[in-house]
């Protein structure tokens, strides 16, 4: 199958550049048509030009002005939540599918192994956050077996893998991830925490998922569901790993402030590591790798099911 679907990337920083490299190296269906940024000296635009990809440092307006834009089917937004609203308006006005890698969350949340096929017709889909892509599949795996009253995720990433865009969107990260834990993961309540670790050498992304479940559900079914979901994520993020077996701890009448009531049941704990593929970024930047991998997976699936492959 030849790469027949032209795509563009807005944002020439770490995420946008890594996504461009993934499209060029990995995709059999997507073709890089253009990259847009606002910094003419960015490494991403320079690299795109060397790879014979059309470039502009005029942002979204510059992208629209490129002759290649007419054929573009998909726009990936790897900028910021604040900038995304206008980008989405322009994309919609021109009939382009927008895949949003910012925490703006204007379109429905998409986590590929959980709910991608529910939003194939949406004009704008949101990839939640790096922490959301890593942890929400685990919340969904637990909630598919037993109702999750409360889920909390802690994403720990290297400070070096948190660029200006990530740092500018910390508040949006926690709010967007918490909302997606509920809407996609299926938890009644959700909370998200991100930790930027300055350790040197840099740490690999680690994620912890805690789910409080009422009663006494089938623990083996939960563990099996978690393992199966991890395999589904690993299909497009090979460095996604369960660091140990799922942990179960009894909870006897514990007051949960976020719920405003007591829980009596079990706490399910899942411990994850995400090692990046090092296509452009260092391998410790699994937080960025899982976002770009999920976006690539989403675009390929939507293109296939919308009949764009010719």
Image: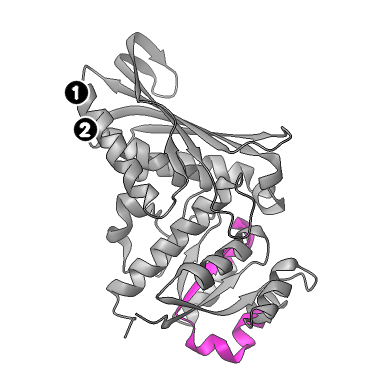
The answer to whether 221 is drawn above or below residue 121 in the figure is above
| Applied colour scheme | one colour
Asked whether 70 falls inside the magenta stretch, the response is: yes
Tag 1 near tag 2, CB within 8 Å: yes
Residue plotted at (61% across, 38% down): 157
Q: Nearer the viewer, residue 193 or 241?
A: 241
Residue at the far right: name it.
41
Disc ID at residue 185: none
Q: Position of residue 257 (x, y in %)?
A: 44, 19
Q: Quadrant of residue 65?
A: bottom right
The answer to whether 236 is drawn above or below residue 151 in the figure is below
Residue plotted at (73% across, 71% down): 38
Q: Quadrant of residue 149?
A: top left
Query: What is the crowding at mark 1: few (fewer than 14 residues within 10 Å), some, or many (at least 20)?
Result: few
What residue range appears in magenta? 61-85
Asked whether 88 falls inside the magenta stretch, the response is: no
Disc ID at residue 218: 1
The earlier-in-sequence mark between 1 and 2 is: 2
Residue plotted at (57% across, 67% down): 21
Q: Position of residue 134 (x, y in %)?
A: 45, 43
Residue at the far top: name it.
252
Secondary structure mostly taken by the magenta-highlighted segment of the chain: helix
Q: Quadrant of residue 120?
A: bottom left
At numbered mark 2, what does the secondary structure look like: helix, strand or loop?
loop
Q: Nearer the viewer, residue 176 or 306?
A: 306
Query: What is the crowding at mark 2: few (fewer than 14 residues within 10 Å), some, or many (at least 20)?
Result: some
At numbered mark 1, what does the secondary structure look like: helix, strand or loop?
loop
Q: Which residue is mark 2?
A: 145
In three-dimensional space, the C-alpha distance between marks 1 and 2, rounded to whole angstroms, equals 8 Å
Q: Nearer the viewer, residue 270 or 189?
A: 270
């Amino acid at each position: 199958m030849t790469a027949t679907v032209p795509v563009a990337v807005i944002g020439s920083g770490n995420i946008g550049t890594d996504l461009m490299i993934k499209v060029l190296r990995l995709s059999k269906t997507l073709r890089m048509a253009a990259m847009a940024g606002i910094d003419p000296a960015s490494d991403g635009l320079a690299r795109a030009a060397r790879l014979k990809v059309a470039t502009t440092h005029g942002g979204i307006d510059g992208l629209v002005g490129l002759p290649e834009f007419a054929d573009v089917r998909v726009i990936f937004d790897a900028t910021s939540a604040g900038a995304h609203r206008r980008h989405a308006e322009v994309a919609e006005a021109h009939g382009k599918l927008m895949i949003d890698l910012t925490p703006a969350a204007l379109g429905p949340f998409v986590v590929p192994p959980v709910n991608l096929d529910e939003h194939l017709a949406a004009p704008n889909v949101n990839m939640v956050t790096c922490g959301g892509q890593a942890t929400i599949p685990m919340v969904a795996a637990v909630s598919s077996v037993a109702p999750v009253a409360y889920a909390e995720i802690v994403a720990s990433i290297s400070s070096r893998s948190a660029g200006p865009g990530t740092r500018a969107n910390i508040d949006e990260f926690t709010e967007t991830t918490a909302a997606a834990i509920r809407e996609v993961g299926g938890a009644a309540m959700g909370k998200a925490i991100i930790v930027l670790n300055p350790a040197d050498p840099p740490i690999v992304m680690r994620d912890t998922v805690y789910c409080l479940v009422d009663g006494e559900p089938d623990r083996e079914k939960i563990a099996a569901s978690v393992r199966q979901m991890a395999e589904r994520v690993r299909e497009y993020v090979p460095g996604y790993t369960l660091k140990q077996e799922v942990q179960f701890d009894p909870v006897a009448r514990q007051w949960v402030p976020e719920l405003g009531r007591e829980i009596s049941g079990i706490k399910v704990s899942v411990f994850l590591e995400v090692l990046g593929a090092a296509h452009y970024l260092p391998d410790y930047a699994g937080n960025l790798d899982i976002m770009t991998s999920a976006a690539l997976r989403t675009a390929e699936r939507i293109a296939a099911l919308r009949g764009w492959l010719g």
